[in-house]
Structure formats: C-alpha cells, structure tokens
Amino acid sequence: MPSPAPPSSACPCGRTDARGRVRAHADCCGPLLGLHVTAPDAEALMRSRYSAFVLARADYLLATWHASTRPAQLDLDPAAKWLGLEVRAHRSIDAAHAEVEFVARFRVAGRAVRQHERSRFAQDQGQWWYVDGDVL
C-alpha cells in the first residue's frame, strides 16, 4: 500500500478553510482515509474518495463503495497524475440519499483527462456509501 500523505501536507481534495487556504490532509480527508471516522455527508465522502485516487488507496475506495454496486477488485492506473478537484454541486435528495457533481482532472501518458460526473450516495446506519455515477 502506498504511504499516506504527510499530516501537514495540503489535502489532495483541495477543500479550503474560512480564510481560503487549502486544509491540511490530517484535518480534512486523512481521518476518513484512516477509517477512524465516517464521512458526515456525501460531499465529504466524495472528496475523501478523490484523495484516495490521488494516494492510490484502492482499499479505501472499495471500503466506501456500496455493496450493491461494488466491484470485486479495483485496479488503479499508477501512471495517472491527479491535478485537481472541483465540486460543482452537492444536493440532498432525502435524509439517506444525495448527489455530488464534480470535475476531477488528471493526466495519463501526457494526455489531459476531465472526469465530469454526478455521483449518487446512500446513507445506511450512519455511514455514507458511494453507489454509482453518471459521466456528464
């Protein structure tokens, strides 16, 4: 497993604090990726999943994927260089369902890629899960 991000490093998800500074990984997605705490909402889970892609944490991605749609395994491309995340919308559908629209940018073999997606999340017994998404 790849080593975790240093605690003082900027969080890969890019979430900022009240002053507009990118939050430290240890104070943002780090506790979620360590499985010490659960995501408080679908957006936080989506951001932590982006950070897991950046840090090549397939174990976390699978652990936060709803059992009804989770693949048996997940092979991440080690050549992918993640460049940034923009959350465009976070919408609660009801108390147990939400959608997050985002654009994730990365580069593979020198080619720039934009993943624009509307992801669906479900909450079960206090835990948010990624269900699936539509590429936009």
Image (tube, rainbow, N blue to C red):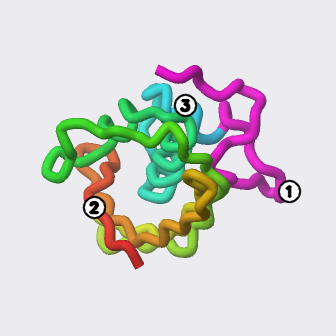
Residue 124 is situated, as x and y percent measured from the top left of the image, at 23, 48
Look at mark 3 in the image and give the residue it sits on. 31
Amino acid of disc 1: Arg
**What residue appears at the point 75 percent right and 40 percent down from the top-left corner?**
10
Residue 77 is situated, as x and y percent measured from the top left of the image, at 45, 42
Side (left or right) of 31 relative to 100:
right
Query: Which image quarter holds the C terminus?
Result: bottom left
Residue at the far right in the pictured view: 19
Q: Earlier in the sequence, mark 2 or mark 3?
A: 3
As displayed, is residue 33 above or below residue 122?
A: above
Look at mark 2 in the image and give the residue it sits on. 132
Q: Decide: few, some or many residues near mark 1? Use Cα within 10 Å; few <14, some 14-19, many ≥20.
A: few
Side (left or right) of 136 relative to 19:
left
Amino acid of disc 2: Asp
Amino acid of disc 3: Pro
Side (left or right) of 52 relative to 10:
left
